[in-house]
Image (cartoon, rainbow, N blue to C red):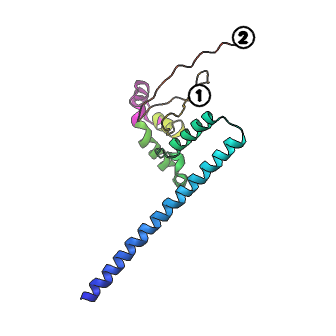
Amino acid sequence: MNVVVLVVGLFVSSLLISQLSAKMVRVQTLNHDRNSSMEMLTRFLMEQGVPRALAGQIQQQIRRRAFAVKRITLQDLPSLQFLSPQLRRELSCSIFCRTLLQHTVFYTWAIYDPPLVTSLCFRAVGLQSFVSQDEIFSPNQKAEKVFFLRLGRLSYTKALERSSTL
């Protein structure tokens, strides 16, 4: 009986150690990749003669965004392409209908023509994820999309007007 307990304990402890080792190797690999890409960026900025202040801002923003956690979008899941069109349509409706139906126009459409809203969710609505300080649109940019904010906050800043002198 004691031998069985010892063997099971040995097996469990070796399994735990191997799992921890594998995770540590994975973390080291990720850190190595990030460090080497940051070293390459630093070298590039130096070779191109980018001023130190600007290079510092660039590196700081890249570090901040590289470690930012973005929400998963449909484009991040290539396996969804294997779904049947009907199941993809249902998934799209499940994800987007709640947001659309909060707006009076779409709610009214849903009452009079439910398949239209389902089709709209499937064909015209998408999911995008942004991190802090991403620029979603800029001044004088042609509006080609409408954004519905589902989570988080937006901050609008007025662009400084430039006058050109000839």
Q: Determine the residue positioned at 49% across, 38% down.
A: 131
Residue in the foreground of this view, choosing between 134 and 66 = 66
* Quadrant where the N terminus is found in the figure: bottom left
- Going from N to C along the chain, the mark reached first, 1 or 2, is 1
Residue, x 71% and y 38% (percent of image)? 49
- Crowding at dot 1, Cα within 10 Å, few <14 / some 14-19 / many 20+, comes out as few
The image quarter containing residue 21 is bottom left
Question: Which residue is label 1 attached to?
Answer: 144
Image quadrant occupied by the C terminus: top right
Q: Is residue 79 magenta?
A: no
- Among the 4 quarters of the image, the one containing residue 102: top left
Residue visible at 55% across and 52% down? 78
Q: Magenta stretch: give its range.
A: 98-115
Q: Residues within 10 Å of mark 2 (few under 14, many from 20)?
A: few
Q: Position of residue 22 (x, y in %)?
A: 47, 67
| Residue type, numbered disc 1 | Glu
Residue in the foreground of this view, choosing between 37 and 91: 37
* Identity of the residue drawn at 40% across and 28% down: 107
Residue 105, how many percent across, how many down?
43, 25
The main secondary structure of the magenta stretch is helix
Which residue appears farthest toward the left when viewing the image? 1
Instruction: Using the image, tell me which numbered label, if any, was put on residue 165.
Output: 2
Determine the secondary structure under disc 1: loop
Against 128, residue 19 (above or below) is below
Q: Amino acid at mark 2?
A: Thr
Q: Which one is nearer the viewer's eye here, 43 or 65?
A: 43
